[in-house]
Image (spheres, rainbow, N blue to C red):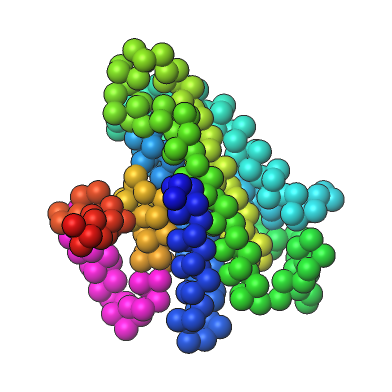
Amino acid sequence: MSPVLRAFLIISALLLLAPLLFPSVYYYRIGVLVLINTLSVTGMVVLLGYVGLVSLGHAGFFAIGAYATAVLPAYGIPPILTILVGAIGAALVAAFIGKPILRLKGHYLAIATLGFGMLVWMVLSKEAWLTGGPDGMVVESIDVKAPFELLGIKIKTAIAWYWICAVAVVIGIVLATNLANSPAGRAMRAVHESDVAAASLGIDVARTKLTAFIISAVYASVAGSLLALFNRYVTPDTADFLHSIEIMTMTVLGGASSVYGALIGALILTSLPQMLTVFAEYENMMFGAIMILTMVLMRQGLAPAIAQLFSRGRK
């Protein structure tokens, strides 16, 4: 069975069976947030897991998609097209800033991407005439008294949004898996191992890094657009530094080299706070303990560790 087909079947089965465990409609909302985070983390897997680049400002691309969906309908652009426009906009911004900053390495690259995220946050907070300022804005395409329509279909409940986001996640993970097994994906992994060795094989290192950066930006933008449509409201917090750290943490926790890790990391860090409301005062402490144990006992993340356990069980 090909890796692409395997990914499609596994992820589809998990998302189809998950609602059987939901005791109430409220859990569909949590499921939607998990899936939106999964989509943005999948993009980070391409960047961090495939190429080995660290971005601490990835929430900036998430915010570009969210605000594109919130603002553009006021200018006559249908909501479904704003997702595409936001993705194209994020790709263009990634291509523009990626050429200079991807020449950097290590902590220099991390600081440069952090600066980009902070710049986006400042623009969204200060340009109140367009973005609503620090208080955010209501998505222009949505009438509070009427349900949102997507391709003529009225989307009224979190259940409907769960299935929309589930389809988006399946497509995103299948595309990322296909990329990993393509010549471009193998070139990315070669760059991850060594820039010098990859260049000696004839791989255009700069172009490969930029391609991964653009792809990850598009994933984040689409996730931001879905969140804006689902919440019907956006704020500059979507571009906040802590949001970027959250995306990075989900990626590392689940396993930066695995698309399955995107779902696992997003599931844990999105749903766990809902389950630990009784221990709200110790929430950060428990998160810290989970991360420490994961890095000490399972350095590659949860998904690769689980895969190794199954492999040992077969043997």
What is the residue that sits farthest to the bottom in this orientation? 23
Q: Is residue 2 left or right of residue 29?
A: left
Estimate the x, y position of residue 98 in percent, counting from the top left. 49, 28
Q: Is residue 239 above or below residue 152?
A: above
Residue at the (51%, 30%) spot, across then down: 211
Quadrant for the C terminus in the image: bottom left
Is residue 288 rendered magenta in the image?
A: yes
Above or below, 245 against 274 in this view is: above
Mostly what secondary structure, the magenta segment? helix
Q: Choose top left, top right, bottom left or bottom right for residue 46.
A: top left
What is the count of numbered marks? 0
Is any atom of residue 201 visible in this view? Answer: yes
Residue 33 percent across, percent down from the top left: 51, 66
- Point out residue 253 in the picture as x, y percentages from the top left corner: 30, 55
Q: Residue at x 53, y 71 (%)?
A: 16
**Residue 180 or 60: which is nearer the viewer?**
180
Q: Where is residue 96, by image quadrant?
A: top right
Q: Residue, x 49% and y 38% (percent of image)?
A: 179
Residue 127 in view (yes/no) = no
Range drawn in magenta: 271-295
- Nearest to the observer: residue 13 or residue 141: 13
User: Residue at point 68% right, 50% down?
Assistant: 83
Judge by depth and name the residue closer to the eye, 129 or 235: 235
Q: Residue furthest left?
A: 296
- Quick check: is 129 in the magenta stretch? no
- Expressed as whole percent of the image width and height from the top left, the position of residue 270 reads 41, 66
Q: Name the one closer to the observer, 171 or 265.
A: 171
